Image (cartoon, rainbow, N blue to C red):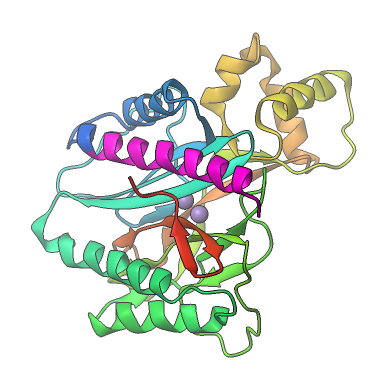
Amino acid sequence: MDEKEIRSYEHAGKIAAKAIAYGMDIIHEGMPVLELCERIETYIFNSGGRPAFPCNVSINEVAAHYTARPNDELTIPKGSLVKLDLGVHVDGFIADTAVSIAFSQDLHSLCDVAKKALENAINSIRPGTPISKIGALIERTIKSYGFKPVSNLTGHKITKWTLHAGKSIPNVFNPDDKAHILEGEVYAIEPFATNGNGYVTESETITIYRYVGGKVKGKEEKALIKIIWRKYKSLPFCERWLLKDIPDFQSKVKHFHNLLNHGNVYGYPVLVERRGSFVSQYEHTVIVLKDGPLVITKI
Ligand code: MN
Ligand code: MN
């Protein structure tokens, strides 16, 4: 990775770090989730970045993939645990970061453990670190506090314009994983901890989408894909964005559903802890340099 690429990642990372701080500053019990998502995304635009995906606000047992829908009436519940997860890109260089906010004293330790697991994981990163070692560290840290890591959610390698670029960083030890961290790679590390049994399942709800490719049938459908590609490439997007970016989208919803049904667009199901238990998460994006990790999503 050359200096210029590192600078671009750092630029995206700084904006992401400031946007998370802004989100933590404005969030409060009773706040409409729609307002929170829109204010954070506007903040990212005004800071010179672009959201790399819709702002995720995942509450309590919801682990990931929830963003406000148009006219969403959901508000931040009293005493809840909120995961605020956001991405920023600058010309396709992506930074992905998340924090947990607990509105109840009882939930602080569950949040702290995810943060501690993230710190330990980041400190272990060098060129050549076995990926299984990172998973083991995350698992051991979370279990040492009496909680469980979520074993079917992972961190991920990032490349330009690609949020999930193949390699995964699990939150548990997997002896069969023989992959190593390599110099110049970029990773989002994201431990998830729970007071449940450690698995998330897909719910019926979908709020986030992504263009995945394939032959597109229909004139209207092709026109929609053209705008989606121009605006988001293959990064995730949501209905709120389509309403803003596509003239008269309301009348084209049928064609959008055709794209979903034909598999040109993928819908991410909202992920929920299997037993309905609380889930916490922290996330940073790091560049693997010769001497160790450069955390780009810290202020
Ligand atoms: Mn994230
Ligand atoms: Mn991520």
Residue 77 shown in magenta:
no
Residue furthest left as drawn:
105
Horizontal relation, residue 8 to residue 14: left or right = right
What quarter of the picture does the N terminus occupy? bottom right
Q: Is residue 286 above or below residue 85?
A: below
Q: Along the line of sight, which residue is nearer the eye, 47 or 2?
A: 2
Total labels: the figure holds 0
Q: Position of residue 202 (x, y in %)?
A: 53, 57
Q: Is residue 137 above or below residue 259?
A: below
Q: Main secondary structure of the magenta part?
A: helix
Horizontal relation, residue 266 to residue 291: left or right = right
Q: The magenta stretch spans which residues?
A: 1-24
Q: Is residue 74 above or below residue 181?
A: above
Residue furthest top as drawn:
248
Q: Position of residue 108 (x, y in %)?
A: 16, 61
Q: Position of residue 49 (x, y in %)?
A: 50, 29
| Residue at image location 24% in from the left, 40% down from the top | 24
Horizontal relation, residue 73 to residue 231: left or right = left
| Residue at image location 42% in from the left, 33% down from the top | 68
Q: Along the line of sight, which residue is nearer the eye, 119 or 290?
A: 290
